[in-house]
Amino acid sequence: MTFRIACGKCGAYIYAGIELRYARDVLKVAGGKCRECGSHLSLKDFALDVVKVRV
Ligand SMILES: [Zn+2]
């Protein structure tokens, strides 16, 4: 299973990995801004996309 957090505006992944992270923690690390489009991020802008992978 991969856990990804994407920018709600440009769709760039703020975080992608197998480790489950809280959106607010990722947002803190990212400085509250999207690295791609530079827009200010708030929690409600995040889209959670959890994809199950067959093992
Ligand atoms: Zn963005």
Image (cartoon, helix red, strand yellow):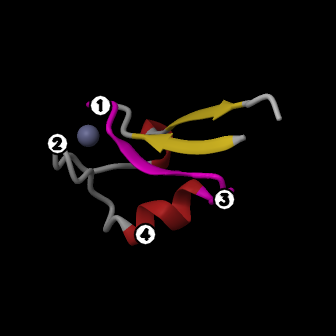
Q: Is mark 1 within 8 Å of ligand 1?
A: yes
Query: Which of the labelled discs sits on residue 28, or is there none?
Result: 4
Q: Is mark 2 within 8 Å of ligand 1?
A: yes
Work out whether residue 21 or residue 51 is closer to the camera in this orientation and state it. Answer: 51
Q: Position of residue 14 (x, y in %)?
A: 39, 50
Place residue 32 in its image quadrant. bottom left
Query: Do labels 2 and 1 touch, CB within 8 Å?
Result: yes
Q: Amino acid at mark 2?
A: Cys
Q: Position of residue 51 (x, y in %)?
A: 67, 30
Q: Amino acid at mark 3?
A: Glu
Q: Nearer the viewer, mark 2 or mark 3?
A: 3
In the structure shown, which secondary structural element does the residue marked by tag 1 occupy?
A: loop
Report the residue marked by disc 2. 37
User: Which quadrant holds the N terminus?
Assistant: top right
Q: Nearer the viewer, mark 4 or mark 3?
A: 3
How dense is the environment of label 1, judged by Cα within 10 Å: few (below 14), some, or many (20 and up)? some
How dense is the environment of label 4, judged by Cα within 10 Å: few (below 14), some, or many (20 and up)? few
**18 to the left or right of 16:** right
Report the residue marked by disc 1. 9
Report the residue marked by disc 3. 19
Q: Is residue 21 magenta?
A: yes
Q: Amino acid at mark 4?
A: Lys
**53 to the left or right of 41:** right
In the structure shown, which secondary structural element does the residue marked by tag 3 occupy?
A: loop
Magenta segment, which residues? 10-22
Among the two numbered marks 4 and 3 on one chain, the one whose residue lies closer to the N terminus: 3
| Residue displayed at 29% across by 31% down | 9
Q: Is residue 51 above or below residue 35?
A: above
Give the quadrant of ligand 1: top left
Q: Nearer the viewer, mark 3 or mark 1?
A: 3
